[in-house]
Amino acid sequence: MIISPPDEREGFDEIDAEKSTDVVVAFWQRMMKRYGSEEDYVKQIVNAFKFGDEPEILIVVDKLLTGFDAPRNTVLYLARRLKDHTLLQAIARVNRLYEDDTGSRTKDFGYVIDYVGVLGELDQALTTYSALEGFEEADLKGALASIHEETRALPQRHAELWDVFKTVKNRQDEEGFELLLADERLRAGFYERLSAYAKTLAIALSSERFITDTPEQKLRAYKNDLKRFVNLKAAVKLRYAESVDYRDFEPRIQKLLDTHISASEVVQLNAPVNIFDEAAFQKVVEEQGAGSEKNPGAKADMIAHATRRAIHERLEQDPAFYEKFSRLIQQAIDDYRAKRLSDLEYLQRVTEIKNAVVSRKGDDLPPALNDDADAAAVYGLLRPFVANHLSDAARVRTTAAEAAMAVWDIFRRNRKVGYWDDLDAQRRTMNEIDDYLYDEVKGARGIALSTDEMDEIIEKTMQLARHRMAG
């Protein structure tokens, strides 16, 4: 509780707290003894409310209407009449969006519990208060919404969520649901509808009238469907190797599940595991149940999409190597969706592709580049240019490998802290690469590179280096 000093009350005379029956005075003296001053008392109580677990409720009279910003504050209880400016200030205490330490939004709106019927004056306050002169009346419409009006939208939100799966004949076919959501746009629509449904259900479950008026069987269906679709979302995020966005709505749904629903079966959603960490990757596949022999298609999808994600993340670091496997993994996914591959064939093919990416099998690197991944990436870029002018495959490999090592050595010599902010260092690098291509590759080795080819090589190697070099 935060109060003003008792001696500010009209007609108050100082009283010995030990003999007084005035609990307000006794409370105030305890607070002053604990905190030392009114300023520290208010400051520490407010900070504990804003950032700690206790107190959960602040009781105030004509206080904290200005200069008080606690975005996590969710419920405002109005127990006395307010109007105009004061009413707007009070409402503003719960209208802040709130994100937790991970950046996850855990609050979209606040609740106002009106015990004295003052909210009827809010419309007038919103349209007459001078600070809102820049807004049209229509812009302010909906600033306050009745819980009961929001709750009436729940059946529609529920139906819209199920409508995503209208083409799946068997509603108990979890594999069918997951396969349907292989389509990214459909998956995004499902996430959006799930979010809307969860938000509306949370509002409904905060209403005693809704809980009382809704049949128990219907309540159970609403809750069970939420749990089911949250599980489904977790499953498809893992299956299709999606990244976890902690600004997403999972924390809010998890709070709803923890409060109203037994959620012991809800899948814990983990960030996608790097396929290059073989042990960790296999552990996630097996722990999430996709490793079961009864569902090789699900396991194959996890491997395929995790591999595709890894390729996408590394594509610009080594385009020549990863582009080839990008095409192969996408072709495997497309063939499976078109039913040109069985579950087991799909699993075998994507496993082979994943293993080839991890081990760089099929890279066909000259031995001199085996321990130099940076020069190997440049080699993949240079080789097609050299091959345009030479028919001898062995000579192409040797020339491209020597040129790759020389070009990357130029980057190593010029590399420095803040290199990508230093235009002079970058120009010096480009000039040295240009001189090497002209003097050594074109001149000494007789590879008739054109000016346009050399310019393209320089541009591409600079782009590649930017993705492989930090600082």
Image (spheres, rainbow, N blue to C red):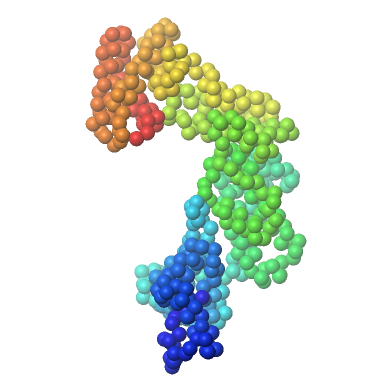
Q: Residue 379's image quarter?
A: top left
Name the residue located 40 percent from the left edge and 10 percent from the top edge. 398
In the rendered image of this protein, does residue 95 appear above or below residue 372?
below
In the image as oriented, which residue stretches furthest toward the right? 217
Quarter of the image with the C terminus in it? top left
Which of the two residues, 339 or 283, is positioned nearer the viewer here? 283
> Which residue lies at the image location 43% right of the left edge and 30% below the top edge?
316
Residue at x-position 71% and y-position 34% = 292
Residue visible at 39% across and 70% down in the picture: 67
Quarter occupied by residue 302: top right
> Can residue 287 be seen here?
yes
Q: Would you place residue 48 above or below residue 88 in this image?
A: above
Percent position of residue 354, x then y: 57, 26
* Total numbered labels placed on residues in the image: 0
Residue 356 pos. (x, y %): 56, 22
301 lies left or right of 435 = right
Residue 260 pos. (x, y %)? 67, 60
Q: Nearer the viewer, residue 13 or 427?
A: 13
Residue toward you, 434 or 416:
416
Q: Nearer the viewer, residue 178 or 159?
A: 178
In the image, residue 458 lies at what x, y percent? Answer: 32, 24
Position of residue 224 in the picture relative to residue 98 (left or right): right
233 vs 300: above or below: below
**Residue 124 in view:** no
